[in-house]
Image (cartoon, rainbow, N blue to C red):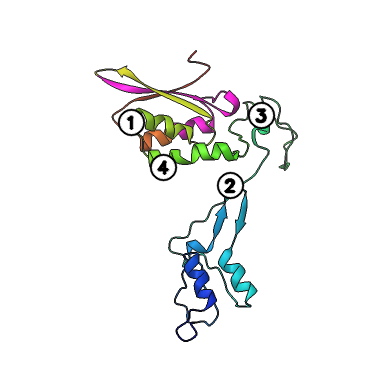
Amino acid sequence: MARGTEPHPLQDEFDLNGAAQCGFCTPGILCSAAALLDVNLGHGQTSYPVAEVLAARGIPFAFLTGYGATNVRARYRKGIGAGGNVGSGKLTTLLSRPLGVSDAVNPSPATGGEDPETLDRARENAPLTTLTLDRAVSIADYRNFARAFAGIDKAHALWIPSGIGRGVLLTIAGVDGAEVPETSEVYGNLADALATYGDPLVPIRIVNHLDSR
């Protein structure tokens, strides 16, 4: 790419942005390194400095996401959020009507719906999974693990006496302080997760904040 002893302007851009060129044999095809993407979260804007130089100079390029071994695929389902948390007897419309079914109603409240996180809330919650590293050992771990759990808005954990040892009392609240019923999917999933990633020798009791007042 260099011209004699002088670096090509594109090389200067790669060096300036800390980017890298992968060893592909196909002429003109470049694979992105992490530094090719410059995200400015402060202003909500995304810029691609090296890509802009490539495009301006008419050089074909492609951003490749990986070789497949460590790729992560995620599915995101978007609904109406907290607006779907309705009381018993409120859901009466069938999306499909199987033969012989004339009507339907929800006997239990619908729970677990959450609105998308605000930017401030995402900044607050994002470090929690790093702090716990998907395990709960200390009392702070139990609190942070629950706070980062889907459907849980707030959590507080305390050590309590339990036999000759001690256990954990975990108080939780749902979205906007809503109750998280013991029969709900959120409650069951949280209890199962803590049983899996918590200390198996430490008993844990999960209560709603409304019950602990």
User: Are discs 2 and 3 less than 8 Å apart at CB?
Assistant: no
- In front of the other: 178 or 147: 147
Residue 180 on the magenta segment: yes
Q: Residue at x 66, y 41 (%)?
A: 79
Residue 204 on the magenta segment: no
Q: Residue at x 63, y 36 (%)?
A: 115
What element does badge 2 sit on?
Answer: loop
- In front of the other: 53 or 104: 53
User: Are discs 1 and 3 less than 8 Å apart at CB?
Assistant: no
Instruction: Give amino acid for label 3.
Output: Asn
Q: Alpha-carbon neighbours of circle 1 within 10 Å: few (<14), some, or many (≥20)?
A: some
Q: Which mark is residue 17?
A: none
Q: Is residue 92 visible?
A: yes
Instruction: Give amino acid for label 1.
Output: Ser
Whichever of callouts 1 and 3 sits on the residue coming sooner in the sequence is 3
What element does badge 3 sit on?
Answer: loop
What element does badge 4 sit on?
Answer: helix
- What's the distance in space between the residues labelled 1 and 3, CA to CA? 39 Å
Figure check: 211 above or below 139: above
Figure check: 184 above or below 212: below
Q: Position of residue 35 (x, y in %)?
A: 49, 62
Q: Which mark is residue 130?
A: 4
- Residue at numbered disc 2: 42
Whichever of callouts 4 and 2 sits on the residue coming sooner in the sequence is 2
Q: Position of residue 213 (x, y in %)?
A: 50, 12
Instruction: Give amino acid for label 2.
Output: Gly
- Residue at numbered disc 1: 138
Q: Position of residue 61 (x, y in %)?
A: 58, 74
- Residue at numbered disc 3: 106
Whichever of callouts 2 and 3 sits on the residue coming sooner in the sequence is 2
Whichever of callouts 2 and 1 sits on the residue coming sooner in the sequence is 2
